Amino acid sequence: MARVNPGEFLRQVRAESAKIVWPSRKETLMTGVMVVIMTSLLALFFFGVDSAFSAIVQRLLALLG
């Protein structure tokens, strides 16, 4: 493992930080909107599956009891 002094380390950190490409405001907004849409769709899907299983269990319990 190579050891570097703190000054060299900070220069390397600055060099690597300069390579970062940050998303634009529009890209960030669109990604956020897509996350909200997909989360809502998944919530509706799981609500439907849960309701279906609940109805099945209720009917089975009514048959047995």
Image (cartoon, helix red, strand yellow):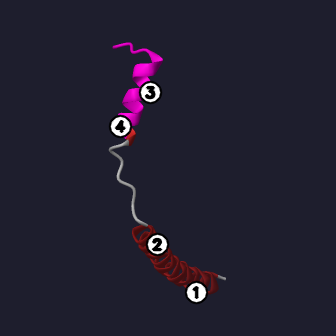
Res. 29 mark: 2
Residue ID for mark 3: 10
Res. 59 mark: 1
Q: Quadrant of residue 60?
A: bottom right
In this rendering, is residue 40 above or below 15?
Answer: below
Count of marks overlaid on the render: 4
Which quadrant would the C terminus be assigned to in this image?
bottom right
**Mark 3 residue crowding within 10 angstroms, few (<14) / some (14–19) / many (20+):** few
Mark 4 vs mark 3: which is more N-terminal? 3
Q: CA distance from mark 4 to mark 3?
A: 10 Å
Q: Is disc 1 in contact with disc 2, using a CB cutoff of under 8 Å? A: no
- The residue type indicated by label 2 comes to Leu
Which secondary structure lies at badge 1? helix
Mark 3 vs mark 1: which is more N-terminal? 3
Q: CA distance from mark 4 to mark 1?
A: 61 Å
Residue at x-position 45% and y-position 68%? 25
Between tags 3 and 1, which lies in front?
A: 3
Q: Position of residue 23 (x, y in %)?
A: 39, 61
Q: Is residue 62 left or right of 13 when viewed as pictured?
A: right
Magenta extent: 1-16
Residue ID for mark 4: 16
Which secondary structure lies at badge 4? helix
Q: Main secondary structure of the magenta part?
A: helix
Residue at x-position 58% and y-position 86%? 59
Which secondary structure lies at badge 3? helix
In this rendering, is residue 20 above or below 56?
Answer: above
